[in-house]
Image (cartoon, rainbow, N blue to C red):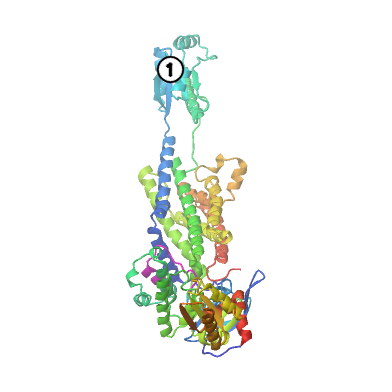
């Protein structure tokens, strides 16, 4: 293994050729730059909806009295529901099936009379019951029922005239309130950089190896360090451009409130170092281009879904959380969020040290296994 | 051990094993500066392994290889700037143009003022300067490969099967380029399947089979020492001619055109055959008598079937 010199001019030449090859291949440009942006736009829109979620609520008022109208108005004023009346003449269950509604609240015919009687008598042990006709197979109906019950509890408490005995006041561990899109963007940055670095490295190196370009390069003064550093720097340049575009779109479209600081550059660089090195090793171990890509897939998919890119790892079962904590991408995700959301330098440093150690090991193994510079052991 | 500094390449007892198999088996040779040396051999003879050891890509199992007076296993990064290599099946970056490819390789060799125009002119690619590699024909790709091998103005140029897969026109165009290099005094180390190519270009030819050198010398010497017979071809013959020649104790063969070829030790044998054919009343429309070429020498040394067909001649001699 020749580790003797790093040639800046050779690295520059490799980067120039790589960048020219990159922008002349339009599909690669699309997948590298546009695809992560599309992901942010699609998921960002979905999550924006969820952050300010207003539920569709159908109400069948069989009572048609002042009290029932007041109840509907109170629910409307909670600002959590977009209320649609259902005709009292229809069968609520059939109507829900026919119109694919997941929840219809039925106000009973005797609603006002029962309510008045209980208020006059002053006993509230047996409440007036509203019927909730719901579709248990519908995604999100449980949340909607929960929000409805909370709204009804508030109305009950106001009607009883007594102040609440127990109240709660939320205090965030963060300096400011953040939305799901702000959790999501650092995850997508980490994932996009990982995917591009791993696949960029595997695809380019496997192709060049198979075509014999690596053999030709082995007869030039280029060293293994030159080659792997060229790959890392080229991927880093693309990662910076791609990250900048992702952030610009996130700020412009979703007005995200994310902190931009030096940690962002550090984590993008470590992400690139770690996964380009891993790609180099896979290219060497797998030998064939197809099997190298398959091996990259096998590594990438668990990381994408289990390391907290799309949702917090705390949502997963305990054993998967333990597994997530051995995945390098987990520390990029956590580090980026610590830096960009919580601005917690200690947490960011801890993550940087872990991913940095991983990147260093992989980088050295990558140098040892790459074929440039002659016969490998 | 060869130590004379006039040698560009000195190979002594070179051996290379792969998992117990011997790809190169104790070969030795030397190439003088300015010489064109051709390594001929069938597929799997060990030509590419030998070239790759000389190029510093592979390490020998044993033996010593010196390039320009330097040991290839110890002075790789001193040797590399002084050699140029066209590897077998040369390939480059698909979306990079001819000119950019040459600029790229020049930068790898830290050439401050590379003569890109001159290189493109040498390999006749000036009008293709802006064409991306993937859009070049096979012949043009190989010519670019030659130009790439020359970007560092090397003292030795290694060409591993430079014309394999090219059509006859492209092959001849490539030969023109190689002859120009020869005129310019470059040391060329060539491996090839094409005897015509070796005969035209090489000063010294070495024939290898199963990792061993079977014969070495100038094309003329090899023909003289390994094929001292005549090749007679009888064209458009009657079917009886074959039997007549065979009954006379020779070993006639039909070629792909239906002509009879027979190898003869003496000129008297030609007269005897012609007389026998005439006396039988059989006819033929043409006669060709020539000295053997390098291809016949190569086949004799590497093809066991061919060896049997010429064995009788040598016994007669």
In the image, taking residue B315 as reference, residue A125 lies left or right, namely: left
| Residue that sits furthest to the right in the current view | B20
> Observer-nearest residue: B158 or B139?
B139
> Observer-nearest residue: B155 or B216?
B216
Magenta part of the chain? B86-105
Secondary element under disc 1, as helix, strand or loop, is strand
User: Does residue B302 appear in the picture of this structure?
Assistant: yes
> Observer-nearest residue: B127 or A92?
B127
Expressed as whole percent of the image width and height from the top left, the position of residue B279 reads 53, 82
In the image, taking residue A6 as reference, residue A21 lies left or right, namely: left
- Residue under the image location 42 percent in, 57 percent down: A238
The image quarter in which residue B134 lies: bottom left
Residue on which the image places disc 1: A60
> Observer-nearest residue: A276 or B9?
B9
Expressed as whole percent of the image width and height from the top left, the position of residue B121 reads 35, 76
- Residue under the image location 50 percent in, 79 percent down: B233
- Residue under the image location 60 percent in, 47 percent down: A323
Other residues around mark 1 within 10 Å, as few (<14) / some (14–19) / many (≥20): many
**Circle count:** 1
In the image, taking residue A324 as reference, residue A120 lies left or right, namely: left
């Amino acid at each position: 293994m020749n580790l003797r010199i790093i040639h800046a001019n050779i690295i520059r030449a490799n980067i120039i050729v790589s960048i020219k090859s990159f922008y002349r291949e339009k599909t690669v440009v699309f997948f590298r730059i546009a695809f992560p942006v599309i992901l942010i736009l699609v998921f960002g829109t979905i999550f924006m909806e969820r952050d300010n979620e207003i539920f569709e609520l159908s109400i069948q008022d069989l009572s048609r009295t002042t009290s029932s109208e007041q109840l509907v108005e109170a629910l409307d004023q909670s600002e959590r529901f977009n209320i649609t009346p259902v005709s009292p003449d229809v069968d609520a269950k059939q109507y829900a099936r026919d119109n694919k509604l997941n929840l219809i609240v039925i106000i009973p015919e005797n609603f006002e009379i029962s309510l008045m009687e209980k208020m006059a008598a002053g006993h509230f042990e047996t409440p007036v019951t509203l019927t909730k006709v719901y579709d248990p197979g519908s995604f999100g109906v449980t949340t909607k029922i929960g929000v409805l019950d909370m709204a009804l509890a508030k109305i009950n408490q106001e009607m009883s005239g007594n102040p609440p005995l127990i109240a709660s006041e939320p205090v965030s561990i963060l300096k400011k309130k953040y939305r799901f899109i702000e959790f999501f963007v650092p995850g997508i940055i980490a994932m996009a950089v990982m995917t591009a670095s791993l696949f960029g490295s595997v695809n380019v190196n496997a192709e060049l190896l198979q075509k014999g370009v690596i053999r030709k390069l082995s007869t030039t003064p280029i060293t293994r360090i030159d080659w792997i550093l060229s790959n890392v720097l080229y991927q880093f340049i693309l990662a910076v451009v791609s990250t900048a575009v992702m952030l610009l779109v996130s700020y412009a479209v979703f007005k995200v409130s994310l902190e931009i600081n030096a940690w962002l550059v550090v984590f993008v660089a470590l992400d690139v170092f770690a996964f380009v090195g891993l790609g180099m090793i896979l290219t060497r171990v797998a030998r064939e281009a197809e099997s190298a890509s398959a091996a990259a897939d096998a590594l990438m998919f668990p990381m994408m879904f289990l390391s907290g890119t799309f949702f917090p790892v705390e949502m997963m079962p305990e054993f998967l959380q333990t597994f997530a904590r051995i995945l390098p991408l987990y520390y990029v995700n956590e580090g980026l969020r610590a830096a960009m959301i919580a601005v917690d330098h200690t947490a960011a440093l801890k993550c940087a040290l872990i991913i940095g150690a991983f990147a260093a090991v992989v980088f050295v193994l990558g140098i040892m296994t790459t074929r440039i510079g002659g016969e490998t052991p | 051990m060869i130590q004379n500094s006039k040698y560009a390449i000195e190979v002594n007892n070179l051996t290379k094993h792969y998992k117990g198999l011997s790809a190169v088996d104790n070969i030795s040779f030397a190439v003088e500066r300015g010489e064109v040396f051709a390594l001929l051999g069938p597929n799997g003879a060990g030509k590419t392994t030998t070239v790759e050891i000389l190029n510093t890509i592979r390490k020998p199992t044993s033996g010593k290889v010196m390039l320009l007076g330097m040991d290839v296993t110890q002075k790789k990064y001193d040797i590399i700037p002084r050699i140029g290599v066209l590897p077998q099946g040369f390939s480059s970056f698909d979306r990079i143009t001819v000119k950019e490819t040459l600029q790229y390789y020049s930068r790898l060799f830290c050439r401050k003022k590379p003569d890109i125009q001159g290189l493109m002119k040498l390999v006749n690619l000036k009008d293709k300067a802006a064409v991306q590699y993937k859009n070049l024909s096979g012949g043009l790709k190989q010519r670019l490969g030659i130009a790439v091998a020359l970007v560092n103005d090397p003292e030795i140029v290694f060409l591993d099967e430079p014309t394999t897969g090219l059509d006859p026109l492209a092959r001849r165009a490539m030969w023109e380029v190689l002859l120009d290099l020869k005129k310019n005094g470059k040391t060329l180390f060539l491996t090839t399947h094409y005897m015509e190519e070796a005969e035209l270009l090489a000063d010294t030819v070495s024939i290898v089979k199963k990792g061993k050198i079977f014969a070495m010398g100038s094309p003329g010497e090899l023909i003289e020492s390994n094929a001292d017979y005549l090749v007679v071809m009888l064209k458009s013959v009657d079917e009886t001619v074959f039997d007549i020649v065979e009954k006379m104790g020779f070993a006639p063969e039909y070629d792909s055109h239906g002509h009879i070829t027979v190898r003869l030790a003496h000129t008297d044998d030609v007269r005897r055959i012609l007389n026998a054919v005439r006396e039988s009343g059989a006819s033929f429309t043409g006669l060709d008598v020539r000295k053997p070429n390098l291809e016949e020498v190569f086949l004799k040394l590497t093809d066991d079937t061919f060896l049997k067909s010429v064995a009788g001649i040598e016994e007669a001699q």
